[in-house]
Image (cartoon, rainbow, N blue to C red):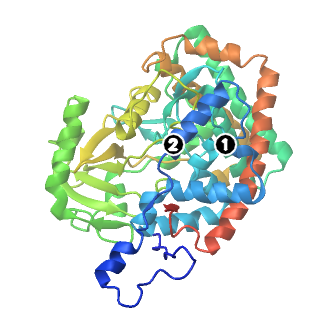
């Protein structure tokens, strides 16, 4: 936190009391130092910058900064993004900064606000969609649908917001580019082809939806998925009993075990029973048989999970299954929701997904048709939390096991899955025009559109490389143990 600044008198001498002055006189004469968070107002400032850029004003956005100016921008943006975690002296904040320093891909994943401030206001001419907001190779995976059966789709909605469709393609392209370098060590030529396949998969699927309108029925399941995804279904499958006992429960099955990741807080069961009841009431669903009577059996804090959300409160709630013998219990996760990294940065739009957990729940309900019924928003003691079901088959791909050929196949499938999520924006979201033909037209001619996406990706990845270098140097100097303050 900020240290109190020393005061000086008009002649520059120390502002201590003069001979014969009383303590009360000293306190009265000495000016007060007021410190306020520097981040206050920055969201509104960037919102105004977004509007100016969208209107064609000639301004200098952060992406054009170099040298020390860029270093200070990176530092202040990361401090602002982690303000609460730094102020609370969260152990998760320190762990997260260490994690960001460990690889460029982890740095990319955990600094979405920095990435999107470089995109402030651009692509205002492009069709809007319910954007995922944080597309990268590890934000696609296996998860339960509304019936508890496994499907492959987008799986992280923390940043979701209405934005130009190109923002997801550009974020996803950079994600594949950086991962293909860090994990696989591929050359630039091979990475360009991977990005092109990602965009091709997206455009092929979007053209198909524009013609046949099948986006609400095109779930990727075990029986209809490409080979690279079928393998993931097989690897993700695990018996629920083995999953529960192997990863979460005490030997007697009566609650969560205690270890370096799980911290039981059984005394909080009543509070989370209310949260579960509120969730069921808000969602208005009929409780599935597999959830028994929605009775909370135990609660724990989950430590050390995620990258972008590392250091934010996260709870696992154990729900007693119908057999009552801990072989079919289910786990609902509650994670503190935060403002989208894209808020105030996208070109002005009339579409509003809401704020915090309500926004996240809205995005999931649009992008993942017939998805997890426990995905929702609740308030716990005045704080906004999003919820979702943990499942034995919830898993994402092991990138280090992919060959160059399967990298391209996987990128193409992810592009197609993203297209399906976007295509639902006018079916289940707020978009009031036909999304699919609009995107197909905006992406024409296709070779030029793909070239432009690849060009953006290479430039952004080069900037990310330099940002990461400067971040690592600052992190070594303890730059992220304090937040920016204004003293006056």
Say whether residue 403 is visible. Answer: no
Would residue 171 be found to the left or right of residue 133 on screen? Answer: right
- Label 2, label 1: how many angstroms apart (C-alpha)? 14 Å
* Number of marks: 2
| Displayed quadrant of residue 64 | top right
Image position, residue 94 (x, y; %): 50, 69
**Residue that appears at 59% across and 25% down:** 419
Mark 2 and mark 1 in contact? Answer it, CB < 8 Å.
no
- Which residue is at the front of the view, 433 or 17? 17
Name the image quarter holding the N terminus: bottom left
| Label 2 Cα neighbours within 10 Å, binned few <14 / some 14-19 / many ≥20 | some
Image position, residue 386 (x, y; %): 34, 43
Would residue 349 be found to the left or right of residue 313 on screen? Answer: right
Q: Secondary structure at mark 2?
A: helix
Q: Looking at the picture, does residue 392 appear above or below residue 197?
A: below
| Label 1 Cα neighbours within 10 Å, binned few <14 / some 14-19 / many ≥20 | some
**Residue that appears at 54% across and 43% down:** 139
Say which residue label 1 marks: 118
Q: Secondary structure at mark 1?
A: loop
Would residue 227 be found to the left or right of residue 185 on screen? Answer: left
- Which residue is at the front of the view, 106 or 295? 106
Image position, residue 391 (x, y; %): 37, 47
Say which residue label 2 marks: 43
| Displayed quadrant of residue 408 | top right
**Residue that appears at 42% across and 19% down:** 428
Q: Looking at the picture, does residue 236 appear above or below residue 3?
A: above
Q: Looking at the picture, does residue 250 appear above or below residue 420?
A: below
**Residue that appears at 16% across and 49% down:** 273
Q: Which residue is farthest bottom? A: 19
**Mark toward the viewer: 2 or 1:** 2
Image position, residue 475 (x, y; %): 62, 69
């Amino acid at each position: 936190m900020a240290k109190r600044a020393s005061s000086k008198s008009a002649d520059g001498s120390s502002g201590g009391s003069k001979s014969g002055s009383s303590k009360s006189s000293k306190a009265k004469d000495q000016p007060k130092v007021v410190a306020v968070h520097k981040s206050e107002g920055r969201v509104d400032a960037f919102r105004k910058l977004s509007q100016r850029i969208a209107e064609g004003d000639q301004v200098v956005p952060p992406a054009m900064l170099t040298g020390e100016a860029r270093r200070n921008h990176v530092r202040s943006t990361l401090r602002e993004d982690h303000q609460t975690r730094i102020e609370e002296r969260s152990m998760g904040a320190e762990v997260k900064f260490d994690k960001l320093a460990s690889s460029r891909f982890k740095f990319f994943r955990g600094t979405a606000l920095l990435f999107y401030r470089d995109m402030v206001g651009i692509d205002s001419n492009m069709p809007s969609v319910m954007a995922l907001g944080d597309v990268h190779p590890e934000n696609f995976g296996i998860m339960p649908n509304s019936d508890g059966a496994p499907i492959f789709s987008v799986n992280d909605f923390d940043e979701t917001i209405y934005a130009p469709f190109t923002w997801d393609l550009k974020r996803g392209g950079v994600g594949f580019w950086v991962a293909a370098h860090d994990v696989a060590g591929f050359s630039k030529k091979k990475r360009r082809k991977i990005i092109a396949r990602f965009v091709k998969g997206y455009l092929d699927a979007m053209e198909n939806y524009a013609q046949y309108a099948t986006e609400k029925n095109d779930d990727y399941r075990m029986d209809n998925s490409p080979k690279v995804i079928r393998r993931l279904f097989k690897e993700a499958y695990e018996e629920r009993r083995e999953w529960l006992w192997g990863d979460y429960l005490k030997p007697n099955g009566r609650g969560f075990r205690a270890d370096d990741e799980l911290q039981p807080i059984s005394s909080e069961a009543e509070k989370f029973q209310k949260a579960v009841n509120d969730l069921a009431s808000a969602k208005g669903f009929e409780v599935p048989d597999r959830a028994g009577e929605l009775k909370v059996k135990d609660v724990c804090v989950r430590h050390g999970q995620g990258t972008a959300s590392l250091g934010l409160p996260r709870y696992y709630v154990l729900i007693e299954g119908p057999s009552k013998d801990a072989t079919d219990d289910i786990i609902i996760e509650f994670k503190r929701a935060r403002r989208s990294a894209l808020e105030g940065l996208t070109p002005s739009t009339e579409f509003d997904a809401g704020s915090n957990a309500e926004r996240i729940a809205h995005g999931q309900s649009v992008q993942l048709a017939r998805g997890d019924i426990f995905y929702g928003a609740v308030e716990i003691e005045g704080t906004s939390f999003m919820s979702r079901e943990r499942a034995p088959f919830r898993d994402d791909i092991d990138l280090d096991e992919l060959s160059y050929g399967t990298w391209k196949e996987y990128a193409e499938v992810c592009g197609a899955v993203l297209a399906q999520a976007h295509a639902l924006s006018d079916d289940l979201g707020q978009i009031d025009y036909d999304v699919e033909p609009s995107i197909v037209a905006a992406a024409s001619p296709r070779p030029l559109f793909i070239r432009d996406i690849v060009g953006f990706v290479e430039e952004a990845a080069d900037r990310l490389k330099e940002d990461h270098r400067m971040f690592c140097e600052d992190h070594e100097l303890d730059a992220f143990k304090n937040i920016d303050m204004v003293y006056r």
